[in-house]
Image: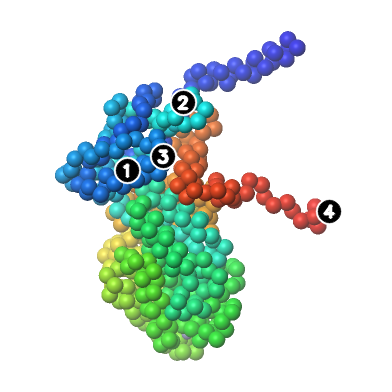
Amino acid sequence: MKRIRLFLLLLCIPLWASAANSSYVRPTICPEPQSFEISDTVYHPLTRVSVRCADKTALEWAQTHLTAWYGDLAPKVVWGGKESSDMGEGAYELSAGKKEVAIKASTLQGIRYALYSLRQITIAQRGTLSVEGWIIPECTIQDHPDMAFRGVHICWFHETEPWEVERLIRLAAYYKMNYAVIESWGTFRSEIAPWYGWEDGTMTKEEVARLKAIADDLGITLIPQINVFGHATMSRGGAGKHAVLEFHPEYQTLFEPCGGWNWCLSSPAVRKLLPELIEERMDAFGNPPYFHIGGDEAHQPSCPDCIRQDYAQLFIDHIRAMHDVIAARGAKTMMWHDMLIDRADPRWEGFTHNGNDLTAKALLDFPRDIVICDWYYGEAKEAYPVADYFKSLGFPVLACPWNKSYKGTIAMSQNAHKAGLDGILVTLWHHYYGGRLQDSYFFASNIAWNAEASLSARSVGKGYGVSYRPFFHTHLRQIGWDMHTTDPRHTGIYYDELPPEPALSTVG
Ligand SMILES: [Zn+2]
Protein backbone atom coordinates (compact mmCIF):
# COMPACT_ATOMS: atom_id res chain seq x y z
CA MET A 1 0.00 0.00 0.00
CA LYS A 2 2.82 2.36 0.99
CA ARG A 3 4.44 1.70 -2.36
CA ILE A 4 1.24 2.56 -4.17
CA ARG A 5 0.91 5.81 -2.24
CA LEU A 6 4.48 6.72 -3.07
CA PHE A 7 3.83 5.95 -6.70
CA LEU A 8 0.73 8.15 -6.68
CA LEU A 9 2.68 10.90 -4.95
CA LEU A 10 5.42 10.71 -7.57
CA LEU A 11 2.77 10.85 -10.24
CA CYS A 12 1.30 13.95 -8.68
CA ILE A 13 4.52 15.88 -8.23
CA PRO A 14 5.02 16.91 -11.84
CA LEU A 15 1.40 18.03 -12.13
CA TRP A 16 1.51 19.98 -8.89
CA ALA A 17 4.87 21.51 -9.81
CA SER A 18 3.53 22.47 -13.19
CA ALA A 19 0.45 24.05 -11.69
CA ALA A 20 2.53 26.04 -9.21
CA ASN A 21 4.68 27.40 -11.99
CA SER A 22 1.86 27.62 -14.37
CA SER A 23 1.42 30.67 -16.47
CA TYR A 24 -2.26 31.18 -16.21
CA VAL A 25 -4.39 30.80 -19.32
CA ARG A 26 -4.91 34.37 -20.36
CA PRO A 27 -8.25 35.39 -21.79
CA THR A 28 -8.18 35.36 -25.54
CA ILE A 29 -10.01 37.74 -27.83
CA CYS A 30 -10.62 36.66 -31.40
CA PRO A 31 -9.62 38.49 -33.51
CA GLU A 32 -6.59 39.58 -31.58
CA PRO A 33 -6.82 43.31 -30.73
CA GLN A 34 -4.19 45.71 -31.99
CA SER A 35 -3.36 46.65 -28.40
CA PHE A 36 -4.53 44.69 -25.35
CA GLU A 37 -3.08 45.38 -21.89
CA ILE A 38 -4.52 43.04 -19.30
CA SER A 39 -3.94 42.26 -15.64
CA ASP A 40 -3.48 38.58 -14.86
CA THR A 41 -4.98 38.71 -11.40
CA VAL A 42 -7.03 41.87 -10.87
CA TYR A 43 -10.69 41.28 -11.68
CA HIS A 44 -13.58 43.65 -11.08
CA PRO A 45 -17.32 43.00 -10.99
CA LEU A 46 -19.03 43.86 -14.26
CA THR A 47 -21.68 46.20 -12.94
CA ARG A 48 -21.60 49.25 -15.16
CA VAL A 49 -20.79 49.94 -18.83
CA SER A 50 -20.40 53.48 -20.04
CA VAL A 51 -20.97 53.99 -23.78
CA ARG A 52 -19.47 56.96 -25.61
CA CYS A 53 -20.28 57.19 -29.32
CA ALA A 54 -21.12 59.62 -32.12
CA ASP A 55 -24.21 57.50 -32.81
CA LYS A 56 -26.66 57.53 -29.91
CA THR A 57 -28.43 54.38 -31.13
CA ALA A 58 -25.35 52.58 -29.80
CA LEU A 59 -26.70 53.04 -26.27
CA GLU A 60 -29.84 51.06 -26.97
CA TRP A 61 -27.89 48.40 -28.84
CA ALA A 62 -25.59 47.97 -25.86
CA GLN A 63 -28.50 47.80 -23.41
CA THR A 64 -30.40 45.25 -25.48
CA HIS A 65 -27.47 42.94 -26.07
CA LEU A 66 -25.93 43.08 -22.60
CA THR A 67 -29.36 42.19 -21.22
CA ALA A 68 -29.66 39.30 -23.68
CA TRP A 69 -26.23 37.98 -22.68
CA TYR A 70 -26.35 38.52 -18.92
CA GLY A 71 -30.04 38.58 -18.06
CA ASP A 72 -30.94 39.89 -14.61
CA LEU A 73 -27.26 40.22 -13.79
CA ALA A 74 -26.54 42.49 -16.76
CA PRO A 75 -24.46 45.58 -16.01
CA LYS A 76 -26.14 48.97 -15.94
CA VAL A 77 -25.54 50.80 -19.21
CA VAL A 78 -24.98 54.56 -19.06
CA TRP A 79 -24.42 57.19 -21.70
CA GLY A 80 -20.86 58.48 -21.60
CA GLY A 81 -21.42 61.29 -24.07
CA LYS A 82 -21.00 61.96 -27.72
CA GLU A 83 -17.70 60.82 -29.16
CA SER A 84 -16.70 63.40 -31.73
CA SER A 85 -13.32 62.14 -32.87
CA ASP A 86 -13.24 60.08 -36.03
CA MET A 87 -11.89 56.74 -34.88
CA GLY A 88 -12.77 54.99 -38.14
CA GLU A 89 -15.35 52.33 -38.98
CA GLY A 90 -15.15 49.48 -36.50
CA ALA A 91 -12.46 51.05 -34.29
CA TYR A 92 -13.07 51.17 -30.54
CA GLU A 93 -11.44 51.62 -27.16
CA LEU A 94 -12.26 49.76 -23.97
CA SER A 95 -11.08 50.38 -20.46
CA ALA A 96 -12.12 48.06 -17.64
CA GLY A 97 -11.47 49.37 -14.15
CA LYS A 98 -12.89 49.14 -10.66
CA LYS A 99 -15.73 51.59 -11.24
CA GLU A 100 -16.89 50.67 -14.70
CA VAL A 101 -16.10 49.42 -18.17
CA ALA A 102 -15.83 52.44 -20.45
CA ILE A 103 -16.16 51.89 -24.18
CA LYS A 104 -15.98 54.44 -26.95
CA ALA A 105 -16.25 54.45 -30.74
CA SER A 106 -17.29 56.77 -33.53
CA THR A 107 -19.79 54.29 -34.93
CA LEU A 108 -22.32 51.75 -33.73
CA GLN A 109 -20.13 49.11 -35.37
CA GLY A 110 -17.25 50.12 -33.11
CA ILE A 111 -19.48 49.79 -30.04
CA ARG A 112 -20.64 46.36 -31.22
CA TYR A 113 -17.01 45.28 -31.54
CA ALA A 114 -16.11 46.67 -28.11
CA LEU A 115 -18.93 44.59 -26.62
CA TYR A 116 -17.92 41.47 -28.55
CA SER A 117 -14.46 41.84 -27.00
CA LEU A 118 -15.96 42.49 -23.59
CA ARG A 119 -18.09 39.34 -23.84
CA GLN A 120 -15.06 37.23 -24.71
CA ILE A 121 -13.15 38.21 -21.55
CA THR A 122 -16.04 38.36 -19.08
CA ILE A 123 -16.38 35.31 -16.85
CA ALA A 124 -18.77 34.19 -14.13
CA GLN A 125 -17.93 35.35 -10.61
CA ARG A 126 -16.24 32.47 -8.76
CA GLY A 127 -17.32 30.39 -5.79
CA THR A 128 -21.06 29.90 -6.04
CA LEU A 129 -23.13 26.98 -7.26
CA SER A 130 -24.63 28.96 -10.08
CA VAL A 131 -23.92 32.35 -11.56
CA GLU A 132 -24.46 35.24 -9.18
CA GLY A 133 -22.43 37.87 -10.98
CA TRP A 134 -19.90 38.60 -13.68
CA ILE A 135 -16.28 39.70 -13.46
CA ILE A 136 -13.83 41.15 -15.94
CA PRO A 137 -10.05 41.52 -15.75
CA GLU A 138 -8.67 45.01 -15.44
CA CYS A 139 -7.59 45.88 -18.95
CA THR A 140 -7.38 48.44 -21.73
CA ILE A 141 -7.93 47.75 -25.42
CA GLN A 142 -7.31 50.02 -28.40
CA ASP A 143 -8.45 48.37 -31.55
CA HIS A 144 -9.26 48.83 -35.22
CA PRO A 145 -9.48 46.58 -38.31
CA ASP A 146 -6.58 46.43 -40.75
CA MET A 147 -8.80 45.56 -43.71
CA ALA A 148 -12.13 47.07 -44.66
CA PHE A 149 -13.69 43.94 -46.20
CA ARG A 150 -13.67 40.93 -43.89
CA GLY A 151 -15.91 38.28 -45.32
CA VAL A 152 -16.87 34.64 -45.13
CA HIS A 153 -18.38 32.63 -47.99
CA ILE A 154 -21.12 30.26 -46.82
CA CYS A 155 -22.64 27.50 -48.94
CA TRP A 156 -26.29 26.59 -48.42
CA PHE A 157 -26.47 23.00 -49.66
CA HIS A 158 -29.54 20.80 -49.94
CA GLU A 159 -28.54 19.16 -46.65
CA THR A 160 -27.76 22.45 -44.91
CA GLU A 161 -30.27 23.47 -42.28
CA PRO A 162 -31.15 27.10 -41.56
CA TRP A 163 -29.82 26.93 -37.98
CA GLU A 164 -26.38 26.13 -39.39
CA VAL A 165 -26.39 29.17 -41.62
CA GLU A 166 -27.58 31.31 -38.73
CA ARG A 167 -24.80 30.02 -36.50
CA LEU A 168 -22.17 30.70 -39.17
CA ILE A 169 -23.45 34.25 -39.66
CA ARG A 170 -23.53 34.92 -35.92
CA LEU A 171 -20.04 33.51 -35.48
CA ALA A 172 -18.67 35.64 -38.33
CA ALA A 173 -20.15 38.78 -36.78
CA TYR A 174 -18.80 37.82 -33.34
CA TYR A 175 -15.34 37.51 -34.90
CA LYS A 176 -15.74 41.01 -36.38
CA MET A 177 -16.21 39.98 -39.99
CA ASN A 178 -18.53 42.36 -41.78
CA TYR A 179 -19.71 40.47 -44.89
CA ALA A 180 -21.09 36.99 -45.53
CA VAL A 181 -21.69 35.74 -49.07
CA ILE A 182 -24.55 33.24 -49.11
CA GLU A 183 -24.39 30.88 -52.07
CA SER A 184 -27.51 28.85 -52.70
CA TRP A 185 -26.76 25.36 -54.01
CA GLY A 186 -30.20 24.90 -55.48
CA THR A 187 -31.85 25.71 -52.16
CA PHE A 188 -33.29 29.19 -52.81
CA ARG A 189 -37.03 28.96 -53.48
CA SER A 190 -37.57 31.21 -56.46
CA GLU A 191 -41.12 32.41 -56.99
CA ILE A 192 -40.58 33.60 -60.56
CA ALA A 193 -39.01 30.25 -61.55
CA PRO A 194 -40.09 27.65 -58.98
CA TRP A 195 -38.28 24.96 -60.98
CA TYR A 196 -34.94 26.75 -60.46
CA GLY A 197 -33.62 24.56 -57.63
CA TRP A 198 -34.77 21.74 -55.37
CA GLU A 199 -38.45 21.92 -54.52
CA ASP A 200 -37.74 21.25 -50.84
CA GLY A 201 -34.93 23.82 -50.57
CA THR A 202 -34.90 25.52 -47.18
CA MET A 203 -33.66 28.93 -48.33
CA THR A 204 -37.07 30.54 -48.50
CA LYS A 205 -37.59 34.28 -48.78
CA GLU A 206 -38.92 34.30 -45.22
CA GLU A 207 -35.82 32.53 -43.98
CA VAL A 208 -33.54 34.95 -45.84
CA ALA A 209 -35.45 37.89 -44.32
CA ARG A 210 -35.09 36.38 -40.84
CA LEU A 211 -31.34 35.87 -41.27
CA LYS A 212 -30.90 39.32 -42.78
CA ALA A 213 -32.56 40.90 -39.74
CA ILE A 214 -30.18 39.01 -37.43
CA ALA A 215 -27.18 39.93 -39.59
CA ASP A 216 -28.13 43.61 -39.75
CA ASP A 217 -28.50 43.74 -36.00
CA LEU A 218 -25.12 42.07 -35.43
CA GLY A 219 -23.28 44.26 -37.95
CA ILE A 220 -22.71 41.88 -40.86
CA THR A 221 -24.01 42.39 -44.40
CA LEU A 222 -25.34 39.41 -46.36
CA ILE A 223 -24.39 39.13 -50.04
CA PRO A 224 -26.31 36.76 -52.36
CA GLN A 225 -24.67 34.63 -55.04
CA ILE A 226 -25.94 33.11 -58.27
CA ASN A 227 -23.48 31.33 -60.55
CA VAL A 228 -24.06 32.81 -63.99
CA PHE A 229 -21.51 30.77 -65.99
CA GLY A 230 -20.23 27.38 -64.73
CA HIS A 231 -21.51 25.57 -61.62
CA ALA A 232 -25.00 25.94 -63.11
CA THR A 233 -25.85 22.48 -61.74
CA MET A 234 -26.01 24.07 -58.25
CA SER A 235 -24.65 20.78 -56.98
CA ARG A 236 -21.10 19.73 -56.13
CA GLY A 237 -19.32 18.47 -59.26
CA GLY A 238 -18.57 15.09 -57.76
CA ALA A 239 -22.19 14.51 -56.73
CA GLY A 240 -23.40 14.22 -60.34
CA LYS A 241 -26.67 15.99 -59.56
CA HIS A 242 -28.36 18.94 -61.27
CA ALA A 243 -30.75 20.95 -59.10
CA VAL A 244 -32.87 21.88 -62.14
CA LEU A 245 -32.58 19.07 -64.65
CA GLU A 246 -33.11 16.06 -62.37
CA PHE A 247 -36.82 16.84 -62.16
CA HIS A 248 -37.26 19.41 -64.91
CA PRO A 249 -35.80 18.01 -68.12
CA GLU A 250 -37.89 20.54 -70.06
CA TYR A 251 -35.30 23.19 -69.21
CA GLN A 252 -32.37 21.44 -70.90
CA THR A 253 -32.25 24.26 -73.44
CA LEU A 254 -30.81 26.60 -70.83
CA PHE A 255 -27.69 24.57 -70.11
CA GLU A 256 -24.81 23.19 -72.15
CA PRO A 257 -25.59 19.60 -73.17
CA CYS A 258 -22.40 18.18 -71.63
CA GLY A 259 -23.53 17.69 -68.04
CA GLY A 260 -25.46 20.95 -67.87
CA TRP A 261 -22.51 22.47 -65.97
CA ASN A 262 -22.45 25.76 -67.92
CA TRP A 263 -25.34 27.99 -68.72
CA CYS A 264 -25.80 28.23 -72.51
CA LEU A 265 -24.28 31.67 -73.04
CA SER A 266 -25.60 32.07 -76.59
CA SER A 267 -29.22 31.55 -75.54
CA PRO A 268 -31.41 34.68 -75.48
CA ALA A 269 -33.60 32.87 -72.92
CA VAL A 270 -30.63 32.61 -70.54
CA ARG A 271 -29.71 36.26 -71.07
CA LYS A 272 -33.31 37.19 -70.15
CA LEU A 273 -33.75 34.75 -67.25
CA LEU A 274 -30.56 35.36 -65.26
CA PRO A 275 -31.14 39.11 -64.75
CA GLU A 276 -34.65 38.29 -63.50
CA LEU A 277 -33.23 35.76 -61.05
CA ILE A 278 -30.59 38.28 -59.92
CA GLU A 279 -33.24 40.96 -59.36
CA GLU A 280 -35.40 38.54 -57.38
CA ARG A 281 -32.45 37.55 -55.21
CA MET A 282 -31.48 41.18 -54.64
CA ASP A 283 -35.03 41.90 -53.54
CA ALA A 284 -34.90 38.97 -51.12
CA PHE A 285 -31.62 40.26 -49.64
CA GLY A 286 -32.93 43.82 -49.35
CA ASN A 287 -30.76 45.50 -52.00
CA PRO A 288 -27.33 44.33 -50.87
CA PRO A 289 -24.28 46.47 -51.78
CA TYR A 290 -22.61 43.51 -53.53
CA PHE A 291 -23.78 40.56 -55.65
CA HIS A 292 -21.54 37.54 -56.33
CA ILE A 293 -21.91 36.00 -59.80
CA GLY A 294 -19.52 33.06 -59.31
CA GLY A 295 -17.93 32.63 -62.73
CA ASP A 296 -15.39 29.95 -61.78
CA GLU A 297 -14.42 26.57 -63.21
CA ALA A 298 -16.55 26.75 -66.36
CA HIS A 299 -16.23 24.06 -69.02
CA GLN A 300 -15.76 24.40 -72.76
CA PRO A 301 -19.08 24.85 -74.57
CA SER A 302 -20.73 21.77 -76.05
CA CYS A 303 -23.80 23.10 -77.92
CA PRO A 304 -23.73 23.95 -81.64
CA ASP A 305 -24.85 27.57 -81.11
CA CYS A 306 -22.10 28.37 -78.59
CA ILE A 307 -19.43 26.53 -80.58
CA ARG A 308 -20.25 28.51 -83.73
CA GLN A 309 -19.71 31.82 -81.96
CA ASP A 310 -16.69 33.56 -80.50
CA TYR A 311 -17.03 32.08 -76.99
CA ALA A 312 -14.69 34.63 -75.39
CA GLN A 313 -16.83 37.45 -76.78
CA LEU A 314 -19.98 35.70 -75.57
CA PHE A 315 -18.35 35.42 -72.15
CA ILE A 316 -17.50 39.16 -72.05
CA ASP A 317 -20.97 40.19 -73.21
CA HIS A 318 -22.62 37.86 -70.72
CA ILE A 319 -20.60 39.06 -67.71
CA ARG A 320 -21.06 42.68 -68.74
CA ALA A 321 -24.83 42.19 -69.03
CA MET A 322 -24.97 40.71 -65.52
CA HIS A 323 -22.72 43.47 -64.20
CA ASP A 324 -25.01 46.12 -65.70
CA VAL A 325 -28.11 44.66 -64.05
CA ILE A 326 -26.34 44.65 -60.69
CA ALA A 327 -24.87 48.15 -61.19
CA ALA A 328 -28.31 49.51 -62.07
CA ARG A 329 -29.38 48.47 -58.57
CA GLY A 330 -26.45 50.41 -57.12
CA ALA A 331 -24.47 47.29 -56.21
CA LYS A 332 -21.04 46.01 -57.09
CA THR A 333 -20.41 42.72 -58.88
CA MET A 334 -18.13 40.15 -57.29
CA MET A 335 -16.60 37.32 -59.32
CA TRP A 336 -14.10 34.47 -58.85
CA HIS A 337 -10.87 35.12 -60.74
CA ASP A 338 -9.82 31.80 -62.27
CA MET A 339 -11.50 32.01 -65.70
CA LEU A 340 -9.91 35.42 -66.24
CA ILE A 341 -6.32 34.24 -66.46
CA ASP A 342 -4.78 31.93 -69.04
CA ARG A 343 -3.99 28.43 -67.81
CA ALA A 344 -1.07 28.31 -70.26
CA ASP A 345 0.54 31.48 -68.90
CA PRO A 346 3.63 30.49 -66.87
CA ARG A 347 3.20 33.49 -64.57
CA TRP A 348 0.31 31.74 -62.82
CA GLU A 349 2.06 28.43 -62.32
CA GLY A 350 1.17 27.01 -58.91
CA PHE A 351 -1.99 29.13 -58.61
CA THR A 352 -5.57 28.63 -59.76
CA HIS A 353 -5.96 29.42 -63.45
CA ASN A 354 -8.72 27.97 -65.62
CA GLY A 355 -9.10 30.46 -68.48
CA ASN A 356 -7.44 30.68 -71.86
CA ASP A 357 -5.80 33.40 -73.92
CA LEU A 358 -9.19 34.69 -75.09
CA THR A 359 -10.76 35.01 -71.65
CA ALA A 360 -7.54 36.57 -70.36
CA LYS A 361 -7.81 39.14 -73.14
CA ALA A 362 -11.49 39.65 -72.37
CA LEU A 363 -10.56 40.66 -68.84
CA LEU A 364 -8.91 43.82 -70.12
CA ASP A 365 -12.32 45.09 -71.25
CA PHE A 366 -14.11 44.33 -67.97
CA PRO A 367 -15.58 47.20 -65.92
CA ARG A 368 -13.03 48.02 -63.26
CA ASP A 369 -15.55 48.02 -60.43
CA ILE A 370 -15.92 44.23 -60.56
CA VAL A 371 -14.50 42.87 -57.30
CA ILE A 372 -12.12 40.06 -58.19
CA CYS A 373 -12.16 37.19 -55.70
CA ASP A 374 -8.76 35.54 -55.98
CA TRP A 375 -8.96 32.01 -54.60
CA TYR A 376 -5.99 29.84 -53.76
CA TYR A 377 -6.02 26.89 -51.39
CA GLY A 378 -2.44 25.66 -51.35
CA GLU A 379 0.45 26.05 -48.96
CA ALA A 380 2.00 29.40 -48.06
CA LYS A 381 3.81 31.18 -50.90
CA GLU A 382 6.48 33.84 -50.92
CA ALA A 383 4.57 35.95 -53.44
CA TYR A 384 1.03 36.15 -54.82
CA PRO A 385 1.38 37.33 -58.43
CA VAL A 386 -2.27 36.67 -59.37
CA ALA A 387 -3.58 39.19 -56.85
CA ASP A 388 -0.89 41.68 -57.84
CA TYR A 389 -1.89 41.32 -61.49
CA PHE A 390 -5.59 42.07 -60.95
CA LYS A 391 -4.72 44.93 -58.63
CA SER A 392 -2.35 46.41 -61.22
CA LEU A 393 -5.21 46.44 -63.74
CA GLY A 394 -7.26 48.57 -61.35
CA PHE A 395 -9.72 46.00 -59.94
CA PRO A 396 -10.65 45.74 -56.28
CA VAL A 397 -9.26 42.38 -55.15
CA LEU A 398 -10.13 40.08 -52.24
CA ALA A 399 -7.86 37.25 -51.12
CA CYS A 400 -9.95 34.07 -50.78
CA PRO A 401 -8.22 31.32 -48.82
CA TRP A 402 -9.72 27.99 -47.82
CA ASN A 403 -8.51 26.04 -44.90
CA LYS A 404 -6.91 23.19 -46.75
CA SER A 405 -3.82 24.71 -45.17
CA TYR A 406 -4.07 27.13 -42.26
CA LYS A 407 -0.51 28.26 -42.93
CA GLY A 408 -1.63 29.05 -46.48
CA THR A 409 -4.59 31.00 -45.09
CA ILE A 410 -2.33 33.07 -42.85
CA ALA A 411 0.30 33.76 -45.54
CA MET A 412 -2.25 34.66 -48.20
CA SER A 413 -4.14 36.95 -45.86
CA GLN A 414 -1.01 38.66 -44.56
CA ASN A 415 0.02 39.26 -48.15
CA ALA A 416 -3.39 40.78 -48.85
CA HIS A 417 -2.69 43.43 -46.24
CA LYS A 418 0.90 44.01 -47.37
CA ALA A 419 -0.09 44.25 -51.04
CA GLY A 420 -2.91 46.70 -50.34
CA LEU A 421 -5.72 44.37 -51.41
CA ASP A 422 -9.26 45.24 -50.43
CA GLY A 423 -9.85 42.48 -47.96
CA ILE A 424 -10.43 38.80 -47.34
CA LEU A 425 -13.23 36.43 -48.25
CA VAL A 426 -12.55 33.12 -46.55
CA THR A 427 -14.36 30.16 -48.08
CA LEU A 428 -15.78 27.22 -46.14
CA TRP A 429 -17.31 25.10 -48.91
CA HIS A 430 -18.55 21.87 -47.32
CA HIS A 431 -16.42 22.23 -44.17
CA TYR A 432 -18.82 24.05 -41.93
CA TYR A 433 -18.11 21.72 -39.04
CA GLY A 434 -15.08 20.18 -37.37
CA GLY A 435 -11.49 21.33 -37.17
CA ARG A 436 -11.55 23.09 -40.50
CA LEU A 437 -14.44 25.25 -39.39
CA GLN A 438 -12.42 26.26 -36.32
CA ASP A 439 -9.31 27.00 -38.29
CA SER A 440 -11.10 28.87 -41.08
CA TYR A 441 -12.89 31.23 -38.73
CA PHE A 442 -10.06 31.66 -36.29
CA PHE A 443 -7.19 32.32 -38.67
CA ALA A 444 -9.08 34.28 -41.32
CA SER A 445 -10.80 36.58 -38.84
CA ASN A 446 -7.56 37.16 -36.94
CA ILE A 447 -5.55 38.09 -39.99
CA ALA A 448 -8.28 40.13 -41.67
CA TRP A 449 -8.54 42.22 -38.51
CA ASN A 450 -4.94 42.31 -37.37
CA ALA A 451 -2.42 41.38 -40.04
CA GLU A 452 0.35 41.14 -37.48
CA ALA A 453 -1.69 39.06 -35.02
CA SER A 454 0.74 36.88 -33.14
CA LEU A 455 -1.80 34.06 -33.11
CA SER A 456 -0.35 33.30 -29.70
CA ALA A 457 -3.78 32.10 -28.73
CA ARG A 458 -3.06 28.94 -30.68
CA SER A 459 -0.42 27.95 -28.17
CA VAL A 460 -1.61 29.80 -25.11
CA GLY A 461 -0.68 27.90 -21.97
CA LYS A 462 1.73 25.81 -23.99
CA GLY A 463 2.49 22.58 -22.22
CA TYR A 464 -0.99 22.29 -20.75
CA GLY A 465 -2.68 21.17 -23.90
CA VAL A 466 -4.58 24.40 -24.22
CA SER A 467 -4.88 25.87 -27.68
CA TYR A 468 -7.23 28.48 -29.08
CA ARG A 469 -9.84 25.75 -29.45
CA PRO A 470 -11.40 25.88 -25.97
CA PHE A 471 -12.00 29.57 -26.56
CA PHE A 472 -13.56 28.82 -29.93
CA HIS A 473 -15.83 26.25 -28.32
CA THR A 474 -16.87 28.77 -25.66
CA HIS A 475 -17.70 31.32 -28.34
CA LEU A 476 -19.74 28.77 -30.25
CA ARG A 477 -21.58 27.89 -27.03
CA GLN A 478 -22.37 31.56 -26.39
CA ILE A 479 -23.89 31.72 -29.86
CA GLY A 480 -25.91 28.62 -29.05
CA TRP A 481 -27.28 30.49 -26.01
CA ASP A 482 -28.16 33.44 -28.24
CA MET A 483 -30.01 31.05 -30.55
CA HIS A 484 -31.77 29.32 -27.63
CA THR A 485 -30.48 26.00 -28.94
CA THR A 486 -32.10 22.93 -27.40
CA ASP A 487 -30.93 20.13 -29.71
CA PRO A 488 -27.59 18.54 -28.68
CA ARG A 489 -26.79 17.99 -32.36
CA HIS A 490 -26.77 21.76 -32.83
CA THR A 491 -23.95 22.27 -30.32
CA GLY A 492 -20.18 21.90 -30.57
CA ILE A 493 -18.30 21.54 -33.81
CA TYR A 494 -19.54 18.06 -34.77
CA TYR A 495 -23.15 16.97 -34.96
CA ASP A 496 -22.50 13.71 -33.13
CA GLU A 497 -19.87 12.76 -30.61
CA LEU A 498 -19.45 9.29 -32.08
CA PRO A 499 -19.61 8.25 -35.71
CA PRO A 500 -22.53 5.95 -36.62
CA GLU A 501 -21.91 2.26 -35.99
CA PRO A 502 -20.83 0.40 -39.13
CA ALA A 503 -23.44 -1.81 -40.75
CA LEU A 504 -23.39 -5.40 -39.45
CA SER A 505 -22.33 -6.72 -42.83
CA THR A 506 -19.05 -4.82 -42.61
CA VAL A 507 -18.12 -6.11 -39.17
CA GLY A 508 -18.82 -9.76 -39.91
ZN1 LIG B 1 -24.75 26.89 -75.73
Label 4 sits on a secondary structure element that is loop
Count how many numbered circles sit on residues in the image.
4
Q: Which mark is residue 408?
A: none
Residue underneath mark 4: 508
Q: Residue at x 50, y 82 (%)?
A: 255
Is ligand 1 within 8 Å of the beta carbon of the residue shown at mark 4?
no
State the residue position of label 2.
Answer: 126
Please identify, in this view, whether the residue under mark 2 or under mark 1 is nearer the observer. Answer: 1
> What numbered label is drawn on residue 63?
1
Q: CA distance from mark 3 to mark 2?
A: 18 Å
- Answer with mark 3 or mark 2, whichever residue precedes in sequence: 3
* Residue 281: percent from left, percent from top: 40, 71
User: Which comes sooner in the sequence, label 2 or label 1?
Assistant: 1
| Residue 71 numbered tag | 3
* Tag in front: 1 or 4: 1
Q: Secondary structure at mark 1?
A: helix
Amino acid type shown at disc 4: Gly
Measured in 3D between alpha carbons, the distance from the residue under mark 3 to the one under mark 1, in whole angstroms, is 11 Å
Left or right of 386: which side holds 144? left
Q: CA distance from mark 4 to mark 3?
A: 54 Å
> Cα distance, mark 4 to mark 2?
53 Å
